[in-house]
Amino acid sequence: QVSLVYYEYNVRKGLVPKYGGERFPLLPYAMLYNEDQYYVLGYSNHHRKTSTFRVDGMRPTILEDSVVPRHTDFDPADDTVNIFSMYDAKLQQVELLCENRVMNDVIDRLGEDVHTKSVATKHFIPTVEVSVNQTLFTRTFHIS
């Protein structure tokens, strides 16, 4: 088990401690690499679930003597897919207005079964079930 303070960028692009600078424990399960970033996947008592944290946002990390047993429902393959596919929180249906030129990207990310409808001649709207969270916005801006 480790304890850490997690940081994020403010509007001035400065790193500031998240959660009021509170140090919290994390039981790391795996190190992941996704889209040029390293993440630690582990159980967070603070969030009361398996979560990911970007390694570059963790400062400083302290090894703890206490050990917390791994949750029995942990499956690294499933958790990795869910986390990086926008399904780590409550799911909601959303519609995205997209230009026709990104249809291949939408299908690559969401599959051929994604529900879509045409809008005018240059746009379409896919209806997707996602977690409305930071990952959704990152993915949305990544393909636009």
Image (cartoon, helix red, strand yellow):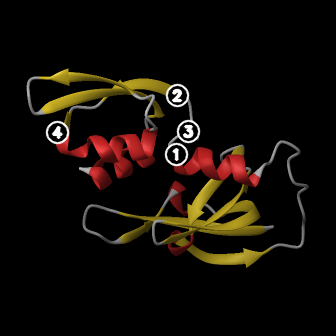
Number of the label disc, if any, that sits on residue 99: 4
Q: Which of marks 3 and 4 is nearer the N terminus?
A: 3
Number of the label disc, if any, that sits on residue 85: 1
Number of the label disc, if any, that sits on residue 87: 3
Alpha carbon of mark 2 to alpha carbon of mark 3: how far?
7 Å
Alpha carbon of mark 3 to alpha carbon of mark 1: how far?
6 Å
Could you say which is closer to the camera, residue 72 or residue 113?
Answer: 113
Amino acid type at mark 4: Glu
Could you say which is closer to the camera, residue 14 or residue 142?
Answer: 142
Badge 2 is on which residue?
91
Q: Where is residue 93 in the image (x, y as percent from the top left)?
A: 42, 23
Residues at circles 2 and 3 in contact by the CB criterion of under 8 Å: yes
Residues at circles 3 and 1 in contact by the CB criterion of under 8 Å: yes
Could you say which is closer to the camera, residue 20 or residue 118?
Answer: 118
> Which of the two discs, 3 and 4, sits closer to the camera?
4
| Residue 90 visible | yes
* Identity of the residue drawn at 33% across and 47% down: 105
Number of the label disc, if any, that sits on residue 129: none
Amino acid type at mark 3: Tyr
